[in-house]
Image (spheres, grey):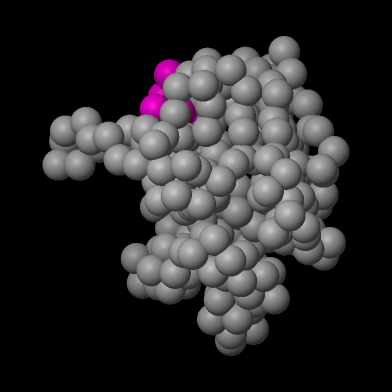
Amino acid sequence: MVLQLTVADDVRAFAPGFHHIAIEAYDLVNTPSTPETSALLDEAARRLAERLDGRAPHEDPHMVAWRDTYKAFGAKPNRTRNSAEALAKRALSDAGLPRINTLVDVYNAISVAHLIPVGGEDLDRIRGGMRLVRATGAEDFVTVAAGERVVEHPEAGEVVWCDDEGVTCRRWNWRQGPRTCLDDTSTNALFLLEGMGEHAGLEAAGAELAELLQKFSPGARITVHPAV
Protein backbone atom coordinates (compact mmCIF):
# COMPACT_ATOMS: atom_id res chain seq x y z
CA MET A 1 0.00 0.00 0.00
CA VAL A 2 1.20 3.52 -0.85
CA LEU A 3 -0.84 6.24 0.78
CA GLN A 4 -1.60 9.17 -1.50
CA LEU A 5 -0.24 12.45 -0.07
CA THR A 6 -0.92 15.75 -1.81
CA VAL A 7 -0.09 19.38 -1.11
CA ALA A 8 -2.51 21.89 -2.58
CA ASP A 9 -1.17 24.40 -5.10
CA ASP A 10 -2.24 27.38 -2.99
CA VAL A 11 -0.25 26.02 -0.04
CA ARG A 12 2.81 25.63 -2.26
CA ALA A 13 2.28 29.15 -3.56
CA PHE A 14 2.72 30.92 -0.22
CA ALA A 15 5.19 28.38 1.24
CA PRO A 16 7.47 27.44 -1.69
CA GLY A 17 10.17 26.28 0.71
CA PHE A 18 7.98 23.56 2.23
CA HIS A 19 8.94 19.94 1.74
CA HIS A 20 8.21 16.73 3.56
CA ILE A 21 9.32 13.14 3.92
CA ALA A 22 6.77 10.37 4.45
CA ILE A 23 7.63 7.08 6.12
CA GLU A 24 5.18 4.19 5.88
CA ALA A 25 5.61 1.45 8.47
CA TYR A 26 3.71 -1.81 8.78
CA ASP A 27 3.69 -4.57 11.42
CA LEU A 28 4.91 -2.27 14.16
CA VAL A 29 4.84 -3.21 17.83
CA ASN A 30 3.68 -0.46 20.14
CA THR A 31 4.06 -0.68 23.92
CA PRO A 32 3.89 1.67 26.87
CA SER A 33 6.99 3.81 27.28
CA THR A 34 10.06 1.91 28.41
CA PRO A 35 13.32 2.93 30.13
CA GLU A 36 14.92 2.74 26.67
CA THR A 37 12.49 5.16 25.05
CA SER A 38 12.74 7.42 28.11
CA ALA A 39 16.52 7.50 27.71
CA LEU A 40 16.03 8.30 24.02
CA LEU A 41 13.94 11.35 24.94
CA ASP A 42 16.53 12.51 27.47
CA GLU A 43 19.27 12.19 24.85
CA ALA A 44 17.14 14.15 22.36
CA ALA A 45 16.81 16.99 24.88
CA ARG A 46 20.59 16.98 25.35
CA ARG A 47 21.14 17.15 21.57
CA LEU A 48 18.65 20.00 21.31
CA ALA A 49 20.40 22.02 24.03
CA GLU A 50 23.71 21.48 22.23
CA ARG A 51 22.22 22.66 18.94
CA LEU A 52 20.64 25.76 20.45
CA ASP A 53 23.74 26.70 22.48
CA GLY A 54 21.84 28.96 24.83
CA ARG A 55 19.29 30.28 22.34
CA ALA A 56 15.54 29.84 22.73
CA PRO A 57 13.93 27.35 20.30
CA HIS A 58 12.11 30.09 18.41
CA GLU A 59 15.46 31.72 17.57
CA ASP A 60 16.65 28.72 15.57
CA PRO A 61 16.59 29.55 11.82
CA HIS A 62 14.31 26.62 11.02
CA MET A 63 11.81 27.71 13.66
CA VAL A 64 12.01 31.30 12.38
CA ALA A 65 11.00 30.02 8.95
CA TRP A 66 8.07 28.11 10.43
CA ARG A 67 6.94 31.15 12.41
CA ASP A 68 6.98 33.27 9.25
CA THR A 69 4.88 30.62 7.51
CA TYR A 70 2.36 30.49 10.36
CA LYS A 71 2.00 34.26 10.17
CA ALA A 72 1.41 34.00 6.42
CA PHE A 73 -1.86 32.12 6.94
CA GLY A 74 -2.96 34.19 9.93
CA ALA A 75 -1.83 32.04 12.87
CA LYS A 76 -0.13 33.63 15.87
CA PRO A 77 3.07 31.60 16.43
CA ASN A 78 3.43 32.71 20.06
CA ARG A 79 0.01 31.24 20.80
CA THR A 80 -0.04 28.26 18.45
CA ARG A 81 3.53 27.06 18.05
CA ASN A 82 4.45 24.47 15.44
CA SER A 83 4.84 21.02 16.96
CA ALA A 84 8.65 21.02 16.96
CA GLU A 85 8.92 24.36 18.75
CA ALA A 86 6.30 23.34 21.32
CA LEU A 87 8.10 20.07 22.04
CA ALA A 88 11.49 21.80 22.19
CA LYS A 89 10.19 24.35 24.67
CA ARG A 90 8.89 21.53 26.86
CA ALA A 91 12.10 19.51 26.50
CA LEU A 92 14.10 22.40 27.95
CA SER A 93 11.67 23.02 30.81
CA ASP A 94 11.66 21.42 34.25
CA ALA A 95 8.71 19.27 33.16
CA GLY A 96 10.68 17.66 30.35
CA LEU A 97 9.20 15.64 27.51
CA PRO A 98 6.09 13.50 28.09
CA ARG A 99 6.34 9.72 27.92
CA ILE A 100 3.43 8.45 25.80
CA ASN A 101 4.20 5.09 24.16
CA THR A 102 7.04 3.58 22.15
CA LEU A 103 6.04 4.95 18.73
CA VAL A 104 5.21 8.45 19.95
CA ASP A 105 8.33 8.59 22.11
CA VAL A 106 10.49 7.64 19.13
CA TYR A 107 9.10 10.23 16.74
CA ASN A 108 9.05 12.92 19.45
CA ALA A 109 12.72 12.21 20.11
CA ILE A 110 13.52 12.70 16.42
CA SER A 111 11.50 15.91 16.32
CA VAL A 112 13.35 17.37 19.29
CA ALA A 113 16.83 16.20 18.34
CA HIS A 114 16.53 17.56 14.79
CA LEU A 115 14.12 20.44 15.55
CA ILE A 116 11.75 19.28 12.82
CA PRO A 117 7.96 18.88 13.07
CA VAL A 118 7.23 15.15 13.00
CA GLY A 119 3.78 13.58 13.17
CA GLY A 120 2.55 10.02 13.43
CA GLU A 121 -0.80 8.82 12.07
CA ASP A 122 -2.48 5.42 12.38
CA LEU A 123 -2.77 4.25 8.78
CA ASP A 124 -5.75 2.03 9.58
CA ARG A 125 -7.75 5.07 10.69
CA ILE A 126 -7.01 7.30 7.72
CA ARG A 127 -9.85 7.47 5.23
CA GLY A 128 -8.65 7.96 1.67
CA GLY A 129 -5.53 10.00 1.01
CA MET A 130 -3.97 12.73 3.14
CA ARG A 131 -4.13 16.28 1.82
CA LEU A 132 -2.50 19.50 2.99
CA VAL A 133 -4.95 22.28 2.09
CA ARG A 134 -6.19 25.69 3.06
CA ALA A 135 -9.43 25.17 4.93
CA THR A 136 -12.77 26.61 3.90
CA GLY A 137 -13.85 26.69 7.54
CA ALA A 138 -16.60 24.11 7.04
CA GLU A 139 -14.42 21.04 7.67
CA ASP A 140 -14.92 19.00 10.84
CA PHE A 141 -12.13 18.62 13.35
CA VAL A 142 -13.18 16.09 15.98
CA THR A 143 -11.43 16.41 19.32
CA VAL A 144 -12.12 15.77 23.00
CA ALA A 145 -12.78 18.37 25.72
CA ALA A 146 -13.53 17.46 29.34
CA GLY A 147 -13.91 13.86 28.27
CA GLU A 148 -16.58 14.66 25.70
CA ARG A 149 -16.44 14.47 21.89
CA VAL A 150 -16.34 17.97 20.43
CA VAL A 151 -16.51 19.03 16.78
CA GLU A 152 -14.54 22.16 15.93
CA HIS A 153 -13.96 23.89 12.61
CA PRO A 154 -10.71 25.43 11.37
CA GLU A 155 -10.60 29.07 10.39
CA ALA A 156 -11.02 29.88 6.72
CA GLY A 157 -7.59 29.95 5.09
CA GLU A 158 -5.96 27.93 7.86
CA VAL A 159 -3.57 25.24 6.62
CA VAL A 160 -4.71 21.77 7.69
CA TRP A 161 -3.99 18.12 7.01
CA CYS A 162 -7.17 16.23 6.23
CA ASP A 163 -8.50 12.97 4.86
CA ASP A 164 -11.92 12.00 3.50
CA GLU A 165 -13.46 12.08 6.98
CA GLY A 166 -12.22 15.46 8.14
CA VAL A 167 -9.27 17.40 9.51
CA THR A 168 -6.55 15.26 11.08
CA CYS A 169 -4.25 18.09 12.17
CA ARG A 170 -4.95 21.80 12.57
CA ARG A 171 -2.67 24.72 11.75
CA TRP A 172 -0.34 22.57 9.71
CA ASN A 173 1.18 20.60 12.57
CA TRP A 174 0.00 22.37 15.70
CA ARG A 175 -2.72 20.08 17.00
CA GLN A 176 -3.45 16.49 15.96
CA GLY A 177 -6.94 15.07 16.31
CA PRO A 178 -7.38 11.94 18.47
CA ARG A 179 -8.95 9.87 15.66
CA THR A 180 -5.64 9.05 13.97
CA CYS A 181 -3.28 9.17 16.97
CA LEU A 182 -0.95 6.23 17.56
CA ASP A 183 -2.08 4.22 20.58
CA ASP A 184 -1.44 0.75 21.99
CA THR A 185 -3.54 -0.85 19.23
CA SER A 186 -1.63 0.76 16.36
CA THR A 187 0.41 -1.52 14.12
CA ASN A 188 0.56 0.42 10.83
CA ALA A 189 1.64 4.05 10.75
CA LEU A 190 2.48 7.03 8.61
CA PHE A 191 5.18 9.39 9.86
CA LEU A 192 5.47 12.87 8.34
CA LEU A 193 8.62 14.96 8.71
CA GLU A 194 8.08 18.55 7.60
CA GLY A 195 10.62 21.22 6.75
CA MET A 196 10.86 24.81 5.61
CA GLY A 197 13.81 25.60 3.35
CA GLU A 198 16.45 23.42 1.79
CA HIS A 199 18.57 23.10 4.95
CA ALA A 200 15.94 21.61 7.26
CA GLY A 201 17.78 18.29 7.54
CA LEU A 202 14.82 16.05 6.72
CA GLU A 203 16.89 13.30 5.13
CA ALA A 204 19.08 12.72 8.19
CA ALA A 205 16.08 12.86 10.51
CA GLY A 206 14.10 10.45 8.33
CA ALA A 207 16.95 7.96 8.19
CA GLU A 208 17.34 8.04 11.96
CA LEU A 209 13.61 7.61 12.51
CA ALA A 210 13.47 4.61 10.16
CA GLU A 211 16.43 3.04 11.98
CA LEU A 212 14.78 3.49 15.38
CA LEU A 213 11.45 2.10 14.18
CA GLN A 214 13.27 -0.99 12.92
CA LYS A 215 15.11 -1.29 16.22
CA PHE A 216 11.95 -1.20 18.33
CA SER A 217 9.92 -3.29 15.85
CA PRO A 218 12.43 -5.70 14.25
CA GLY A 219 9.82 -7.29 11.99
CA ALA A 220 8.40 -4.04 10.66
CA ARG A 221 8.23 -3.24 6.94
CA ILE A 222 9.39 0.35 6.49
CA THR A 223 9.47 2.53 3.39
CA VAL A 224 11.03 6.00 3.38
CA HIS A 225 9.68 8.13 0.54
CA PRO A 226 12.00 10.84 -0.83
CA ALA A 227 11.44 14.44 0.12
CA VAL A 228 8.93 16.33 -2.01
Magenta: main secondary structure equals: loop
In-image side of 224 versus 93 (left or right): right
Tell me what residue is drawn at x 46 percent, y 64 percent: 75
Q: How many marks?
A: 0
Q: Residue furthest bottom?
A: 54
Q: Which residue appears at 68% of the width and 48% of the height?
A: 10
The N terminus, quarter of image: top right
Q: Is 72 a magenta residue?
A: no
Compared with 117, 52 (above or below) is below
Position above or below: 195 against 61: above
Question: Splitting the image into 4 quarters, where does residue 112 fall?
Answer: bottom right
Q: Position of residue 219 (x, y in %)?
A: 69, 17
Residue 145 sits in which quadrant?
A: top left
Query: Which quadrant of the view contains residue 192?
Result: top right
Residue 216, can we see it? no
From the viewer's side, name the closer residue of 219 and 59. 59
Quadrant where the C terminus sits is top right
The residues colored magenta run 179-186
Q: Measuring 44% from the left and 69% from the top, which residue is drawn there?
A: 76
Let me know if residue 140 appears in the view. yes
Q: Position of residue 126 (x, y in %)?
A: 52, 21
